[in-house]
Amino acid sequence: MGIFDPILLWWHRGKVRGKMDRVFSRGRDPYGYDGRSAYETQRLDAMAQAVGFHRFADALEVGCAEGAFTERLAACADRLTAVDISTVALSRAKERLKGKAGVDFVEADVREWSPPAGRRYGLIVLGDVLYYIDKPMVRDIFEKTFPRISSWLEPGGRLMLAHAFVGPKELAHRTGFRERFETQGLKLVSEAPVGAEAGPVRCLISVLESVRK
């Protein structure tokens, strides 16, 4: 890590957290996760379909927001860790899943957070996260995120990426996230854009599997 990297990360973390806290402070469900947005409905349904009928002993969701997809994941995981950078969003996620056993919430930046030593996950979900932290001034720190996250998967574990895009330029950018993970010992299982009926914004959903032993 470069000499200025901790300062840059501190600065950018505050910028991202501030932006997301402002969005969620406008009121509950600003993105329309719970049915108000056709795009979000299609995106979350497609993500649930991509998870399928698998049962996971341990799962991780990075970017849990107010817990709309967390609630679905909790139904197919014995133990679920939900991480978000926004204090406001996380408080609502905790309220939404209050009393749900096996769910832990963590307020953190994925670029510096790590699971407990020896913890590995059968499923990791990254929903609308990576493009928020992919910025030129913190690029070196960002690139280190791919091998770190890949190392958190158990052998045969799956990683789901779900990121919004508009047009071919953003699609290529989102595809680049998946390509980076492929260089870390993950193979592509499925990939498809969803949400065409909801307007110009679509979501690229990629599922990869760890082939490490």
Image (tube, helix red, strand yellow):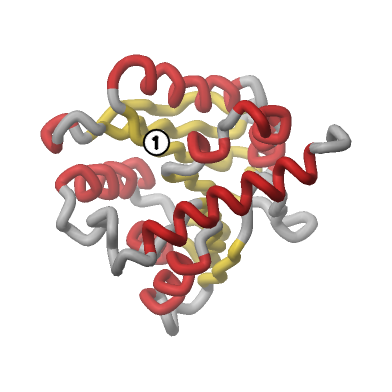
Residue 12 against residue 135 in the figure, above or below: below
Residue 172 against residue 131 in the figure, above or below: above
Hey, which quadrant is residue 185 in on the image? Answer: top right
Please tell me whether mark 1 sits on a helix, a strand or a loop.
Answer: strand
Q: Which of 169 and 113 is in front in this view?
A: 169
Q: How far across and how far down the image is residue 3, in percent?
A: 88, 36
Residue 213 visible here: no
- x 50%, y 20%: residue: 176
Residue 61 visible here: yes
Name the residue that disc number 1 marks: 163
| Side (left or right) of 174 relative to 204 | right
Hey, which quadrant is residue 29 in on the image? Answer: bottom left
Q: Which of 160 and 51 is in front in this view?
A: 160
- x 37%, y 16%: residue: 169
Residue 53 against residue 128 in the figure, above or below: below
| Side (left or right) of 82 relative to 146 | left
| Side (left or right) of 160 relative to 179 | left
Q: Which of 200 and 4 is in front in this view?
A: 4
Badge 1: how crowded within 10 Å, few (<14), some, or many (20+)?
many
Q: How many labels does the image show?
A: 1
Furthest residue to the right? 3
Q: How far across and how far down the image is residue 58, in percent?
A: 57, 58
Q: How far across and how far down the image is residue 102, in percent?
A: 53, 73
Q: How far across and how far down the image is residue 100, in percent?
A: 44, 78
Hey, which quadrant is residue 199 in on the image? Answer: top left
Of the 4 image quadrants, the one containing the N terminus is top right
- x 19%, y 29%: residue: 200
What amino acid does circle 1 point to? His
